[in-house]
Image: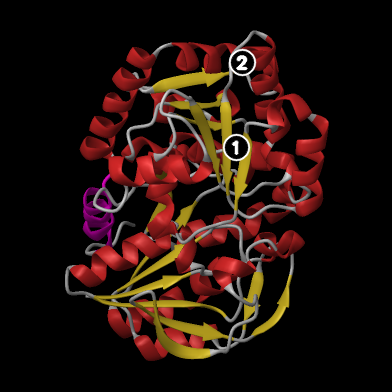
């Protein structure tokens, strides 16, 4: 099968769904191409933090292989709110003549253009069109949210042209229904996943990294991975850690990811009590992240939703995540806690439980790994998408 993944910005070094699906499909013998812009998301370059992993934001346009995935990068006419108008998109897709097109992101110029092209693709190759979305309720507070009512006619046309509309979680489906005005019956759910071969608990790497970082065997490490920016509310993590320290505990905080330097510096200055036991490590390739997760004892995301939840689960870590991210989807297996977003004392209480009980950490960590193996492997998730690729939906 010829499969085109179409996305405005493609960063295979950081992972994400489009990368892992493409790899699974190539592994299964399908002909896969990612069609994207000649640049990475601006978001990753706030403070120039991601350049150590991603290199320059603007890439040379043309076709090649990136991280084992055939990729065509096309020039951009303009960008607006992390959305790109890709030059030559329609021609590249017609030339590839795919059996299935998987567009990542519904509310984009790209999805609208692919939807307009869909009749020609169907006539040419009986192409099946899938559009998925990764948005979450907290995104509704963004500056684009006011435009959603105005965008609904266009989004409705995209939905009408797609064979399948897919949300990556029940929370995303709720967002799509509420903000895009879509019929809930028209939206399916296929969750994000993890490479269970790459992401696993590695005791040798754990011990080596802890020695390197000066962390003792009995110390309890709470890890956060991802973008270190204000909207992730890492001030709450530092606040909660400080509360535990005032009680006589010594929680360690490990931040791994690209950071806005001003924001990171503000965190360390504002919470000097906990900063002595806090570390920041620059972003690493997704394939190396398991080492840092293995070095931790629990994972915390004070705000927002992330594929990193599942990566941490695969490394046998209990989770503490925000209730506003509909975290019950990833903690329903007895593998972690939801805390009330914005409530530092509640976050501290959940951290206290895990800090004080090695038995609880072990029990929740085992439940996390079992859940990943049963529900979140990319092989299983790709099988769900392949079933859709092979048949028109509407």
Q: Residue at x 60, y 71 (%)?
A: 40
Q: Quadrant of residue 78?
A: bottom right
| Quadrant showing the N terminus | bottom left
Residue farthest to the left? 29
Q: Secondary structure at mark 2?
A: helix
Residue 216 visible? The answer is yes
Q: Position of residue 74 (x, y in %)?
A: 56, 86
**Structural distance between the alpha carbons of marks 2 and 1:** 18 Å
Q: Secondary structure at mark 1?
A: loop
Q: Is residue 185 left or right of residue 215?
A: left
Residue 17 visible? The answer is no
Region rendered in magenta = 377-389
Q: Quadrant of residue 267?
A: top right
Kindly report which numbered mark, 2 or 1, lies closer to the viewer in this rendering.
2
The one nearer the camera, 249 or 320, is 249
The one nearer the camera, 369 or 295, is 295
**Local crowd size for mark 1, using a 10 Å CA cut-off: few (<14), some (14–19), many (≥20):** many
The one nearer the camera, 357 or 213, is 213
Q: Which numbered marker is on residue 304?
A: 1
Query: Do labels 2 and 1 touch, CB within 8 Å?
Result: no
Q: Position of residue 101 (x, y in %)?
A: 38, 70
The one nearer the camera, 223 or 147, is 223
Instruction: Specify the principal SS of the magenta part.
Output: helix
Residue corresponding to mark 2: 348
Q: Is residue 183 above or below residue 384?
A: above
């Amino acid at each position: 099968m010829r499969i085109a993944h179409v996305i405005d910005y493609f960063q295979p070094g950081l992972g994400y769904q489009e990368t892992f699906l493409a790899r699974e499909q190539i592994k299964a013998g399908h002909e896969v191409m990612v069609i994207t812009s000649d640049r990475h998301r601006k978001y990753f370059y706030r403070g120039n933090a991601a350049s150590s992993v991603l290199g320059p934001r603007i890439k040379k346009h043309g076709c090649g292989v990136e991280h084992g995935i055939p990729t065509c990068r096309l020039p951009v006419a303009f960008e607006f709110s992390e959305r790109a108008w890709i030059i030559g998109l329609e021609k590249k897709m017609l030339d590839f003549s795919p059996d299935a097109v998987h567009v990542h992101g519904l509310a984009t110029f790209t999805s609208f253009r692919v939807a307009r092209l869909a009749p020609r693709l169907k006539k040419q190759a009986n192409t099946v069109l899938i559009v998925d979305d990764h948005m979450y309720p907290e995104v509704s507070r963004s500056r684009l949210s006011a435009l959603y009512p105005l965008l609904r006619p266009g989004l409705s046309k995209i939905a009408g042209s797609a064979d399948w509309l897919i949300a990556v979680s029940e929370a995303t489906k709720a967002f799509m229904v509420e903000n895009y005005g879509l019929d809930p019956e028209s939206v399916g759910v296929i969750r994000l996943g993890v490479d269970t071969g790459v992401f696993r608990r590695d005791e040798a790497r754990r011990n080596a990294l802890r020695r390197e970082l000066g962390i003792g065997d009995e110390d309890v490490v709470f890890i956060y991975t991802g973008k270190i920016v204000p909207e992730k509310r890492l001030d709450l993590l530092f606040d909660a850690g400080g509360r535990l320290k005032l009680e006589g505990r010594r929680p360690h905080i490990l931040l791994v990811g690209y950071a806005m330097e001003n924001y990171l510096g503000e965190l360390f200055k504002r919470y000097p009590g906990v900063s002595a036991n806090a570390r920041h490590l620059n972003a690493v390739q997704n394939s190396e992240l398991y080492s840092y997760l293995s070095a931790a004892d629990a994972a915390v995301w004070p705000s927002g939703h992330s594929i990193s939840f599942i990566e941490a689960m695969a490394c046998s870590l209990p989770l503490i995540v925000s209730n506003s991210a509909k975290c019950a989807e990833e903690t329903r297996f007895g593998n972690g806690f939801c805390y009330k977003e914005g409530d530092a004392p509640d976050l501290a209480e959940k951290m206290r439980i895990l800090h004080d009980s090695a038995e609880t950490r072990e029990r929740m960590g085992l439940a996390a790994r079992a859940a990943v193996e049963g529900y979140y492997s990319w092989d299983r998730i790709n099988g769900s998408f392949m079933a859709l690729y092979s048949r028109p939906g509407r």
